[in-house]
Image (tube, grey):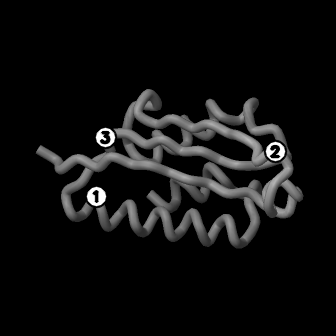
Amino acid sequence: MLSYLNAAVAGSVSAVGRLAVGLGARVWTDLVARGYQLGNADITIEAQVPKLAPHIDAMREILAGFLDVAPERVNVKATTTEGLGFVGAKQGMAAHAVVILEGRQ
């Protein structure tokens, strides 16, 4: 699984981003090994810049492929913080995810 994500994001994320991808892959691998599968995921990305709308579909496809589900089970949306906080000051981004896990039958 990690090789799938590494290929998808190669050269497009920072070292910190690659570390986060690695952590996410490790957690997902452990969950799958324990018999879980994804019900659905709802992900919100906070960013002033860049505009993420043109990339939403690609992000959904990459995540769905990694999680081995149909893209319809993965929702990705982007918003700004209207100039507030470190995101609004263009010093970084934030992401929030709500995930429903199901036991494999």
Q: CA distance from mark 1 to mark 2?
A: 38 Å
Residue drawn where x is 85% and y is 63% of the image: 91
**Between marks 2 and 3 in the image, the one whose residue lies nearer the viewer:** 2
The CA span between labels 2 and 3 is 32 Å
Q: Residues within 10 Å of mark 2 (few under 14, many from 20)?
A: few
- Give the left or right position of residue 59, taking residue 32 as reference: right
Q: Residue at x 85, y 50 (%)?
A: 83
Which comes sooner in the sequence, label 2 or label 3? Answer: 3
Please tell me which of labels 1 and 2 falls first in the chain: 1
Q: Are marks 2 and 3 in contact (CB under 8 Å)?
A: no
- Disc on res. 32: 1
Say whether marks 1 and 2 touch (CB < 8 Å): no
Amino acid type of the residue that numbered disc 1 sits on in the rendered structure: Val
Q: Give the residue number, with chain letter if any, for mark 3.
A: 39
Decide: is 19 above or below 90: below
Quick check: marks 3 and 1 in contact, CB under 8 Å?
A: no
**Numbered disc total:** 3
Across and down, in percent, residue 41 comes to 43, 43
Q: Determine the image quadrant of residue 28.
A: bottom left
In the rendered image, which quarter is residue 59 located in?
Answer: top right
SS at circle 2: loop
Return the residue found at the far top. Answer: 72
Q: For the residue marked with disc 2, what is the amino acid?
A: Glu
**Is disc 3 placed on a helix, strand or loop?**
strand
Neighbour tally class for label 1: few under 14, some 14-19, many 20 plus, Cα within 10 Å: some
Between 24 and 75, the residue placed more toward the observer is: 75
Mark 3–mark 1 distance (CA, rounded to whole Å): 12 Å
The correct choice, above or below, for 23 with respect to 79 in the image is below
Where is residue 100 drawn, in percent x and y? 33, 46
Q: Residues within 10 Å of mark 3 (few under 14, many from 20)?
A: few
Q: Is residue 23 left or right of residue 82?
A: left
